[in-house]
Image (spheres, coloured by chain):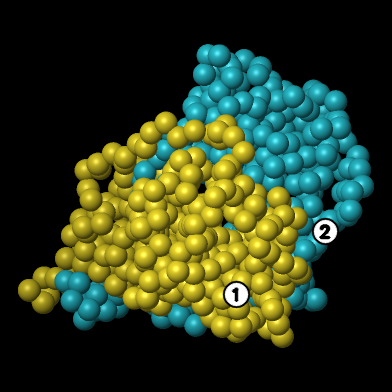
Amino acid sequence: MHILVILKMVPDVVEELEIAPDGKALNTDYLRMILSESDDHALEQALLLKERHGGNVTVVAFDAPEVDDTLFAALAKGASRAVKIVGAEPGMTTSGAGRLLARILVQEPALLPAGLVLAGVQAIDDLDALVAPLLAHQLAMPYLGIVTRVALDPSGETASVLKEYPGGVRGEFEVRLPAVLGIQGAEKPPRYVPVAKVRAAMKSQKIDTVQAPALTGGDLRLVEVLGMNKPQLTGHAEMLEGSPAEVSSRLCEILAGRGVF
Amino acid sequence: MTGEIWVLTEQWRGRVSEITYENLALGRELADALGTPLVAILLGSNAKDLAATLGKADRVLYVDHPLLEDAVPQVLAEVLAGLAKEQMPRAVLVPLTNVGLGVGSFTAARLQAPAVNFCKDVRVHEGRLEASCVMYGGKIESTVALLGSPAVLGMWPGARPAENGRAAASPAVEEIQVVPREAPPVRLKKYIEPETGDVDLTRQDVLVAVGRGIQARENIELAEELAQALGGAVCASRPVIDQGWLPLSRQVGKSGLTVKPKLYVALGISGAPEHVEGMKNSGLIVAVNTDPQAPIFNVAHYGIVGDALDWLPAFTAAIPRRKSQHA
């Protein structure tokens, strides 16, 4: 089976995020970009299926800082092909990117057909849409999100898929293929790939580039960001300062005062 | 007259979820500000009785069909989009939960309508709908204007207290016949109940929660020692469960359990909305994180900026000392 995995680079929120002078976007000067966490799980799930059933895995991503490293890492992990979409309008909305992606998947040779299209269930900057349901709509495929396990049925016509519900409950679904799945977590943690292997992939493999076509009707931009701010600290914690011993002693007094012990 | 404000009722396994009442409370404010009715949309199979609990709305639109029983997002969205296309509401509030995720994006795509995710609040400003959206794992809030109708608002839990969205009144119920186009290509086979863990987190007075900052499986032992000293149990945020360091039965948050212990100690947990949703009502929250900007400090009562691994042994050692001094 051919599996497509949609990868997206997002700001690393471990770093401090700065807002641009216009107050409406992040300041990209010092932004460190990483692969969206659930996309990493989508890739892992695809690689597990490839190992189990054969076939090939194609990873597709829009051009972004650090994306080449991510695509080569995917190749080093076992992806069969990496495709980078270049020339898209900067700062596209998620809904615009999803529409453009659907068009590219249909137009470019050897991307479709695919039995499965996997994407992370959501990214931290998916302001106006989620990619997986949007792609399913555009490609007229079934969709299921918050997925944590995918098993292909021997017929190859359906997949058995686990979706998470609240309270630790999971639902087992039968999904007709081809389908788009929003992956929350792979069956196993995403595999580690040594830097040496990524370097080797950089030497021996290549990233295919695809020029983004113009989006029919443009990026609709049906939402307008009026401003960004860091959350107001109305209920901010009282911060305890000092050495671990000093802080621990103070905290013990607080807990005792609250009747914890 | 401006279009109505719609709230999509989340009903799952025969019960209306709390987020429905939260959204009804917010929807009431929006509807009153715009001078338009508030309508609850109820999609289900033999679920009409649930409409009686939606009295905060002026009326309930109910669609009954066997295909709606399992709340498959694609099916819900098809019906919701069909209704919205016909009746053109001003806005639809949809829950961004594990049950309903995807409904908003599908509905907006079908209608080519403006949509936003991660909404924690919505207001009417100069006749326009503006949403506050929690982005980047809770580190940034965006204020967003929705340019057009119907606006599809993907709501985080907690926009308003659920009790504000309950009312004794029985709303008028209008039943509408809608037939989804065909059997969904996504079919629920069965629910799998959570495995009963060795510890029932929801019954613990003290929880010591570990997140990504715990760094390695072997460090969880330090948290276990603290939990033992405090007479509680260890739980975790999603990344720790995904790594397989603790079982699913120990997960707190959106996909895991909702807990309300007397004391919740969050170690190396950033405070992404998905986790906060499951622990924000704890009696006393203490958070330790290396990042002074971590959103967990916005819900914690006491905060410590530092590496949980440096702080854990000192705190664990201090507890028996404090107990013995005042025994």
Neighbourhood count class around disc 2 (C-alpha, 10 Å): few under 14, some 14–19, many 20 upward: some
Q: Around disc 1, counting alpha carbons within 10 Å, would you say few (fewer than 14), some (14 to 19), or many (20 or more)?
A: many
- Label 2 resides on the chain identified as A
Say which chain is yellow: B
Q: Is residue B291 visible?
A: no
> What x and y, as percent, mark residue B223?
31, 54
Looking at the image, residue B43 lies above or below residue B290: above
Three-letter code, disc 1: Val
Q: Is residue A127 left or right of residue B280?
A: right
In this rendered view, identify the residue nearer to me: A226 or B151: B151
Amino acid at pointer 2: Leu
> Quick check: B164 left or right of B284?
right
Q: Which mark is residue B122?
A: 1
Q: Residue at x 53, y 68 (%)?
A: B39
CB within 8 Å, label 1 to label 2: no
Residue at point 74%, 24% (across, down): A113
Rendered view: A256 above or below B150 = below
Q: Which chain is cyan?
A: A
Q: Does A127 appear above or below B28?
A: above
Decide which of B57, A225 is in the foreground and name it.
Answer: B57
For the point 49% across and 57% down, which residue is it?
A: B175
The residue that label 2 is drawn on is A220
